[in-house]
Image: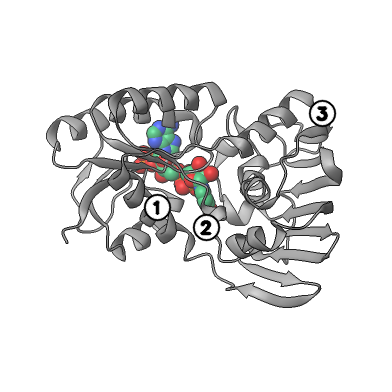
Amino acid sequence: MARTRIALVGIGKIALDQHVPALNASPDWELAATISRSGKVDGIPSYTDFATFLTERPDIPAVSLCMPPVPRYAYAEAALNAGRHVMLEKPPGATLAEVHALQALAKSRGLTLYATWHSRMAHAVAPAKAWLADKTVQKAHITWREDVRKWHPGQDWVFQPGGMGVFDPGINALSILTEILPQPVHLTKALLEFPENRQTPIAAQLTFSGNVSADFDWRQEGPQTWDITVITDKGELALRMGGNVLEIDGKPFAGENTIMGEHPALYARMATLVAQGHSDVDLAPMVHVADALTLGERRITGAFDF
Ligand code: NAP
């Protein structure tokens, strides 16, 4: 069967690390164009202006938006108004309201809008959700500690308004939490650490209902930690390596220690959504971030520079 054409917008770190390999291997999609002010992909027609692309390439019915969240809304709105299906990198936008607006626009136009959460596609998330389904959660804790210099080298946008700071990776943990817990939780307390020269937090400690807590920190050098532990009435679950490896009661249970399957799974889901005429926009992870930024106590910490 012929693959459907798709364009990739915002050719930077995640586009090159994950989207291009996923599309090259996709049975569903053909990478038919890129739109980026300076980035390109060898051998693929490229545009620097999105309006020009939309006018000149009516043969490409879908776009995948990989730029940072703040500029993303204008691109998504223009794409939907031009009759294209839209896939959004995480987090789906800079604000909840703008994503609600995109949802309404996609619905009114009969187009697919997919707000992706790549960490939900990690190998062990589905088995973790299945294991927890008939258990009572007594306690859960997230430890998401990584080195911002390694994962976001020189990306000042993460520390600018709307960049979300440590919630840019932390929202990945929250996307897993909101997927696997059998009951929803809500934020009750947060402590946010802001570098004195930055607009977004570099660390956050979160407390939720249901004895659930989270520790996000962007200052961890050396070994990186992306773990979620859940204590239940019938045993203890540990999701490690960003949701890719699952242990039950300290023993390996499921998973594979690689993130390379996450974006291929997102493109497979996008193909299904378009074929079925559906959208998928779950804002639960972003609600927790918005609540933390609303409720959180703010502490000023030392200056941060890349
Ligand atoms: P990035 O490399 O800094 O940005 C991607 C590209 O977006 C840039 O190369 C730039 O391309 C374009 N762009 C930047 N600012 C723009 C603006 N104001 N208007 C239009 N285009 C702009 O960022 P990234 O790391 O790829 O992250 C992008 C998104 O993917 C974020 O939402 C992030 O949370 C998510 N993500 C990142 C990672 C990761 O490991 N970095 C992992 C998973 C998800 P041009 O200058 O060529 O236009």
Mark sitting earlier along the chain (1/2): 2
Compared across the picture, whether 171 is left or right of 271 comes to: right
Q: Nearer the viewer, residue 293 or 291?
A: 291
**Of the residues shown, which amino acid type is indicated by label 1?**
Arg
Q: Nearer the viewer, residue 57 or 245?
A: 245
Please state the horizontal and vertical placement of residue 22, each as a whole percent of the image: 37, 61
Residue that carries the numbered disc 3 in the rendered image: 298
Which dot marks residue 209?
none
Q: Residue at x 59, y 31 (%)?
A: 160
Q: Is residue 121 visible?
A: yes
Ligand 1, by image quadrant, is: top left
Residue that carries the numbered disc 1 in the rendered image: 269
Residue that carries the numbered disc 2 in the rendered image: 121
| Mark 2 to mark 3 CA distance (whole Å) | 33 Å
- SS for tag 3? strand
Q: Nearer the viewer, mark 2 or mark 3?
A: 2
| Mark 1 to mark 3 CA distance (whole Å) | 38 Å
Mark sitting earlier along the chain (2/3): 2
- SS for tag 2? helix
| Mark 1 to mark 2 CA distance (whole Å) | 10 Å
Q: Nearer the viewer, mark 1 or mark 3?
A: 1
